[in-house]
């Protein structure tokens, strides 16, 4: 079964927000921080830490 990455990430995100009930500012901070780091000079460092 091939599921697109965006669909899997959306499903995990929705379930995580419904089950864990984090504050809205924490969700926004993680999304914005991830977006900004992905397009910065830190992205190779983060990529090497993750993989």
Image: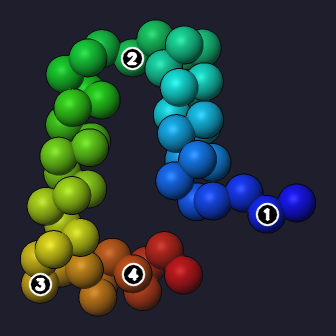
Spatial CA distance of label 4 from label 1 is 24 Å
**Lower sequence index among marks 1 and 3:** 1
Considering only vertical position in the picture, is 45 above or below 39? below
Where does label 4 land, which residue?
A: 47
Q: Look at the numbered discs 1 and 3 and tell me whether their residues touch, using CB distance below 8 Å.
A: no
In the image, residue 25 lies at what x, y percent?
19, 22
Spatial CA distance of label 3 from label 4 is 11 Å
Spatial CA distance of label 2 from label 1 is 30 Å
Q: Quadrant of residue 27?
A: top left
Where does label 2 land, which residue?
A: 22
Q: Which mark is residue 41?
A: 3
The residue at 25%/27% (across/down) is 26
Where does label 1 land, which residue?
A: 2
**Lower sequence index among marks 2 and 1:** 1
Q: Mark 4: give few (<14), some (14-19) or many (20+) Cα within 10 Å.
A: few
In the image, residue 33 lies at what x, y percent?
18, 51
The residue at 60%/14% (across/down) is 19
Spatial CA distance of label 4 from label 2 is 26 Å
Give the quarter of the figure containing the C terminus.
bottom right
Q: Is residue 12 left or right of residue 34?
A: right
Give the quarter of the figure containing the N terminus.
bottom right
**Lower sequence index among marks 3 and 4:** 3
The residue at 42%/86% (across/down) is 48
């Amino acid at each position: 079964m091939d599921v697109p990455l965006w669909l899997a990430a959306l499903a995990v995100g929705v379930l995580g927000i419904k089950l864990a009930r984090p504050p809205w500012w924490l969700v926004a901070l993680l999304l914005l921080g991830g977006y900004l780091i992905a397009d910065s000079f830190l992205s190779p460092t983060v990529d090497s830490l993750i993989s």
